[in-house]
């Protein structure tokens, strides 16, 4: 075998092994920087193609590799303006664009008729010895560039998948933790004087709704239903913070106005003015048969008196928490519960929904289901049944969390 034949065989073997090695990197865990360093070594040192630029598009054009190319040249190249016109391998050493004249060849990497990467190469050495390295190894450089592009894309998608899985796990954990903060039906305090029934359905993994019932001294019960503005993790964290503050502050000897003022301060500190919370908070004294409440910008609960057979909306209160530093006006509502009565509190996911392409606000379902002799559990279950059937029949589309807290006073 002649010397030249042996040299060509050695070079061909090198190229084949290089391509196989780079192909294996596609399923590996190499960093983009490692892939670029390997490409630089192959082109600059092994093949003597000493000038290389590698641009890749990912939301915007990024320069991933620059070798033997003065910044005064690379910084002048705008891929959108200078390179998008090239959809095939092009010799540019005589281009009208003076910046591109610094290179021999442009190699585009095209996917679905869209250029996603450009490799610019040049051999700046004296070519008296023969054919330029850029021409001699052009097909190999093109193949290598495609393999490296695929490897980088695989790495990006791999890490994106890891991030999505991590976020999914975080949401699942947050959802489990949030469900622990929402009392289930078995944990709600029940007495001979008061029966309580609830329903909770977050629209996404984590919700912004919250309710709780807190036994106080002398047979009193305190309760609250709340909804934080916005959705997602930030809303859930704020609501968890609110739940902790409510449990710590709601005691027998605090007034509702004092409690709401303190909660407002805590919400302001936690939310920094970026979110707010609407709530309905109350306390019931079974000995005096009195119900006191404050409605802080929340959907008005429905109170039904079985003796008069009338429904009333409970609206007295103030603005939502976290909206202003000092709440200017706060009215405390008060009712005497002298006959068997029922109360249903709810969040806006129950009454605000999409219907026929429009957002509709309809409170009638609560009055329709509470104004009868049925017990509170039956009333709440009927409300849920109606909404579920309407959504399953595509009559409405629910897009928010639904929480219901019902009381039956005897």
Image (tube, grey):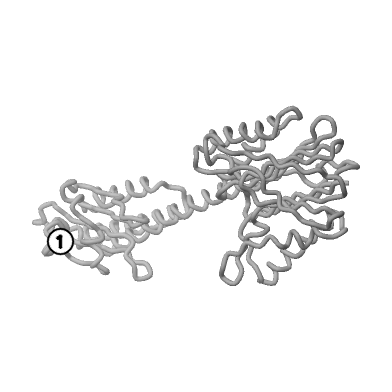
In which quadrant of the rendered image does the N terminus lie?
A: bottom left
**Horizontal relation, residue 225 to residue 3: left or right:** right
Residue 173 in sight:
no
Is 273 placed above or below 359 here?
above
Residue at image position (28%, 51%) is: 63
Residue 136: image location, x then y, percent: 21, 62
| Tag 1 residue | 131
Mark 1 secondary-structure assignment: loop
Q: Residue furthest top?
A: 253
Is disc 1 surrounded by few (<14), some (14 to 19) or many (20+) residues within 10 Å? Answer: few
Residue 14: image location, x then y, percent: 32, 55
Please tell me in which quadrant of the rendered image residue 398 appears: bottom right
Number of numbered callouts drawn: 1
Residue at image position (88%, 42%) is: 193
Q: Nearer the viewer, residue 85 or 240?
A: 240
Please tell me in which quadrant of the rendered image residue 4 appears: bottom left
Residue 301: image location, x then y, percent: 71, 51
Residue at image position (62%, 41%) is: 239
Please tell me in which quadrant of the rendered image residue 109 appears: bottom left
**Horizontal relation, residue 64 to residue 269: left or right:** left
Residue at image position (28%, 49%) is: 65
Residue 357: image location, x then y, percent: 56, 70
**Horizontal relation, residue 124 to residue 332: left or right:** left
Q: Nearer the viewer, residue 34 or 11?
A: 34
Residue 302 in sight:
yes
Is 66 placed above or below 215 here?
below
């Amino acid at each position: 075998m002649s010397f030249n034949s042996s040299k060509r065989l050695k070079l061909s073997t090198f190229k084949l092994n290089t391509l196989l090695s780079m192909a294996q990197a596609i399923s590996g865990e190499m960093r983009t920087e490692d892939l670029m360093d390997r490409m630089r070594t192959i082109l600059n040192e092994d093949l003597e193609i000493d000038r290389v630029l590698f641009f890749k598009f990912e939301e915007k054009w990024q320069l991933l590799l620059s070798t033997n190319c003065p910044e005064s040249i690379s910084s002048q190249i705008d891929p959108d303006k200078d390179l998008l016109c090239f959809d095939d391998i092009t010799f540019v050493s005589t281009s009208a664009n003076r910046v591109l004249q610094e290179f021999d060849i442009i190699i585009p990497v095209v996917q679905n008729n869209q250029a996603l990467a450009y490799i610019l190469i040049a051999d700046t050495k004296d070519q008296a010895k023969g054919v330029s390295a850029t021409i001699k190894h052009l097909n190999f450089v093109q193949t290598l560039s495609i393999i490296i592009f695929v490897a980088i894309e695989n790495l990006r998608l791999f890490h994106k998948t890891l991030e999505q899985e991590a976020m999914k796990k975080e949401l699942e954990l947050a959802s489990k933790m949030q469900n622990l903060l929402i009392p289930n039906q078995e944990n709600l305090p029940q007495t001979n004087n008061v029966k309580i029934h609830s329903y909770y359905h977050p629209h996404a993994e984590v919700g912004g709704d919250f309710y709780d019932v807190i036994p106080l001294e002398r047979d009193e019960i305190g309760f609250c239903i709340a909804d934080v503005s916005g959705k997602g993790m930030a809303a859930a964290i704020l609501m968890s913070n609110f739940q902790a503050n409510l449990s710590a502050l709601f005691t027998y000897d605090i007034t509702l106005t004092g409690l709401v003022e303190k909660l407002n301060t805590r919400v302001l500190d936690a939310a920094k003015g970026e979110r707010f919370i609407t709530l309905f908070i109350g306390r019931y004294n079974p000995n005096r048969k009195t119900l006191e409440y404050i409605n802080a910008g929340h959907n008005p609960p429905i109170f039904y008196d079985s003796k008069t057979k009338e429904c009333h909306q409970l609206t007295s209160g103030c603005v939502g928490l976290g909206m202003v530093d000092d709440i200017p006006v706060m009215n405390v509502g008060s009712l005497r519960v002298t006959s068997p009565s029922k109360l249903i509190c709810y969040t806006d996911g129950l009454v605000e929904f999409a219907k026929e392409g429009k957002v509709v606000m309809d409170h009638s379902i609560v009055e329709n289901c509470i104004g009868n002799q049925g017990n509170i559990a039956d009333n709440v279950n009927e409300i849920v049944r109606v909404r579920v059937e309407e959504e399953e029949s595509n009559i409405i589309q629910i897009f928010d969390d639904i929480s219901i807290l019902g009381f039956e006073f005897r």
